[in-house]
């Protein structure tokens, strides 16, 4: 819903900011959004490690079918030409575009791309980088992006941990019997270091154990693979 609002035709501020800690399923949600809108309008890409402009443009250009055997400047002009107002570009882990002043080139290009084409750009960041944007050494530079998102109050902030309804749905999808009775245990797993990924891992291992014994998945299997009493 947040992305749909940001990409609406005629909207003044078409940058969006999604803030969430690691393990809050930002990437999974973005991929699902692209899958549900598979007419080609949304692009999703993971920011390259190091955030160099050339590598970033290469990944962005690949979304439009552009080969990597061309110069950075040609990639830039290509993107400014092919991106339309209807396009929505989702950039995951956008904090990796910033590792110091030299990497502001990527942010400069994003600003130019949005201003020129009118497309929507959704940036996914961590709470740590949110502090850098708002109160870091280059906060005055990033203020232009804060403004283009409509202000920090308009940012979508994901909960630090998954709600109970999500945890139970995941457990039921794995086939766990009587998931509601064990909500406290499942919630506890999802709040350990690693968050929701820990729950997925334990449920997968427990399901494999249950299948090896030709049994239905129960909380006992989960407890056993965790080595707990």
Image (spheres, rainbow, N blue to C red):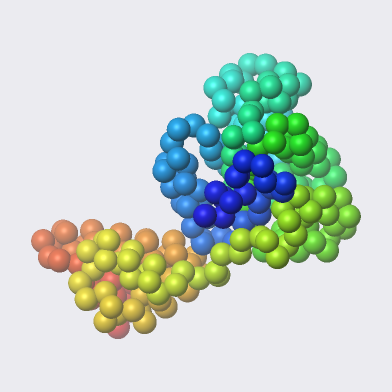
Location of residue 121 by image quarter: top right
Q: Is residue 72 left or right of residue 135?
A: left
* Residue at (69% x, 51% y) in the render: 95
Q: Quadrant of residue 222?
A: bottom left
Residue located at (67% from left, 16% from top): 70
Front-most of 19 and 82?
Answer: 82
From the image, which quarter does the C terminus lie in? bottom left
Numbered-mark total: 0
Query: Which residue appears at 44% of the width and 65% of the height?
Result: 196
Examine the rendered structure and indicate whether residue 2 appears above or below residue 64. below
The x, y position of residue 217, in whole percent, is: 20, 67
Q: Residue furthest left?
A: 214
229 relative to 89, above or below: below
Q: Nearer the viewer, residue 156 or 195?
A: 156
Query: Is residue 106 in sight in this rendering?
Result: no
Q: Residue at x 37, y 61 (%)?
A: 201
Question: Horizontally, is 137 left or right of 157 in the view?
Answer: right
Residue 214: give x, y in percent of width and height. Answer: 11, 61
- Compared across the picture, whether 36 is left or right of 105 comes to left
What percent of the width, then of the height, locates residue 89?
Answer: 60, 39
The answer to whether residue 12 shows anywhere in this view is yes
As drawn, 208 above or below 82: below
Viewer-proximal residue among 4 and 31: 4
Most extreme residue toward the front, as rendered?
10
Give the image quarter of residue 77: top right
Percent coordinates x, y for residue 28 in the rendering: 46, 51
């Amino acid at each position: 819903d947040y992305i749909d609002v940001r990409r609406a035709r005629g909207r003044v501020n078409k940058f969006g900011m999604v803030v969430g800690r690691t393990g809050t399923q930002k990437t999974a949600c973005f991929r699902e959004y692209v899958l549900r809108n598979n007419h080609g309008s949304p692009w999703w890409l993971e920011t390259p490690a190091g955030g160099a402009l050339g590598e970033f443009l290469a990944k962005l250009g690949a979304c439009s079918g552009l080969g990597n055997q061309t110069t950075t400047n040609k990639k830039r002009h290509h993107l400014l030409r092919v991106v339309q107002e209807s396009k929505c570009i989702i950039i995951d882990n956008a904090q990796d575009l910033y590792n110091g002043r030299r990497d502001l080139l990527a942010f400069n290009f994003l600003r130019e791309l949005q201003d020129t084409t009118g497309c929507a750009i959704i940036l996914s960041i961590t709470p740590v980088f949110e502090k850098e944007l708002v109160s870091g050494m280059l906060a005055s530079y990033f203020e232009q992006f804060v403004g283009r998102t409509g202000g920090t109050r308009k940012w979508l902030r994901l909960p630090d941990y998954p709600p109970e309804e999500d945890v139970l749905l995941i457990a039921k999808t794995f086939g766990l019997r009587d998931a509601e009775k064990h909500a406290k245990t499942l919630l506890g797993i999802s709040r350990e270091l690693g968050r929701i990924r820990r729950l997925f891992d334990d449920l997968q291992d427990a399901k494999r154990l249950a299948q090896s014994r030709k049994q239905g998945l129960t909380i006992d299997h989960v407890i056993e693979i965790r080595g707990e009493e």
